[in-house]
Every structure is written in C-alpha cells, then in structure tokens.
Amino acid sequence: MISPLSSHSHQATGDPYYLEAGRTILDNLNRFARVPCGFAAMKDVRTGSHEDRMDSFFLAEMFKYLFLLFAEAEDIPFDVEGYVFTTEAHLLPLSLSTAPNSSSIPSNRTVI
C-alpha cells in the first residue's frame, strides 16, 4: 500500500523513485484488483479470484495518497505543509495544535 511517507518523500526529495513506485502500485491495482464496479479485494492471490467487496479504506486512503503523490502543487487546494497526515489519510491541521513552541518549553538541563 502506498503510504503518506511515499507522497511526502517525493515532495521533499524530488526523487523519481517514489513516482515510479506509485506508478507500479497503480498499474498493479488496475491489473489485479480492477473489476467492472471498482476495485475488489483479492480472495486468493494464487488464482487471482476476488472477493465481492471493496474496502472503504481503499478509496479513502489509497487514492488520496496516490493523488498527493502525482499531483502538482497547483492541483492541491490547500498547503499540505500545514497538516499532519495520519496512516488513515486523515488531515490534522497543525493550526489546531495546542503544543507550545519548542523554544518556549522549559529545559530541565543544568548547565555547568
């Protein structure tokens, strides 16, 4: 599965490896999981048979991270740097953080 790390790693490094990995994932999803009504869970990878269901996380997580991986900055309607992405692809705004700035946290270290 593609992860938030993959989309962020490409954005941070510009390394085409992450785009290539995303392309491989997308190609294999279309090759092995695509069915007429969407994408199905694999019942048996040895036979290629599918289950009669598509997990909700598939759309909610997989395609969100694929979109973020392949999108140009102008395609994303918000600044991704202002959010933390959970492993379930939920966006948590950093602006709601109640943690104080690291510079204002008192230190328990004694300077000799």
Image (cartoon, rainbow, N blue to C red):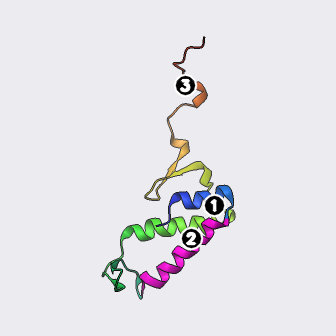
Q: Which mark is residue 10?
A: 1
- Crowding around mark 2 (Cα neighbors within 10 Å: few <14, some 14 to 19, many 20+) is many
- Inspect the magenta stretch and tell me whether residue 4 lies in it: no
Question: Is disc 2 placed on a helix, strand or loop?
Answer: helix
Q: Is residue 38 above or below residue 60?
A: below
Q: Is residue 71 visible?
A: no
- The residue lying toward the viewer, choosing from 17 and 74, is 17
Q: CA distance from mark 2 to mark 1?
A: 10 Å
Per the rendering, the mark at residue 22 is: 2
- Residue 52 lies, in percent from the top left, at 30, 82
Q: Earlier in the sequence, mark 3 or mark 2?
A: 2
Quarter assignment of residue 58: bottom left
Q: Nearer the viewer, residue 16 or 94?
A: 16
For this rendering, which residue is in front, 78 or 7? 7
- Residue at numbered disc 3: 105
Residue at 54% in and 57% down: 5
Residue range (magenta): 16-35
Q: Are marks 2 and 1 in contact (CB under 8 Å)?
A: yes
Could you say where residue 57 lies in the image, as x and y percent from the top left? Answer: 40, 67
What residue is at 55 percent from the left and 75 percent from the top?
24
- Tag 1 or tag 3, which sits nearer the N-term? 1
| Front disc: 3 or 2 | 2
Splitting the image into 4 quarters, where does residue 70 fall? bottom right
Picture coordinates of residue 11, whole percent (x, y): 65, 59
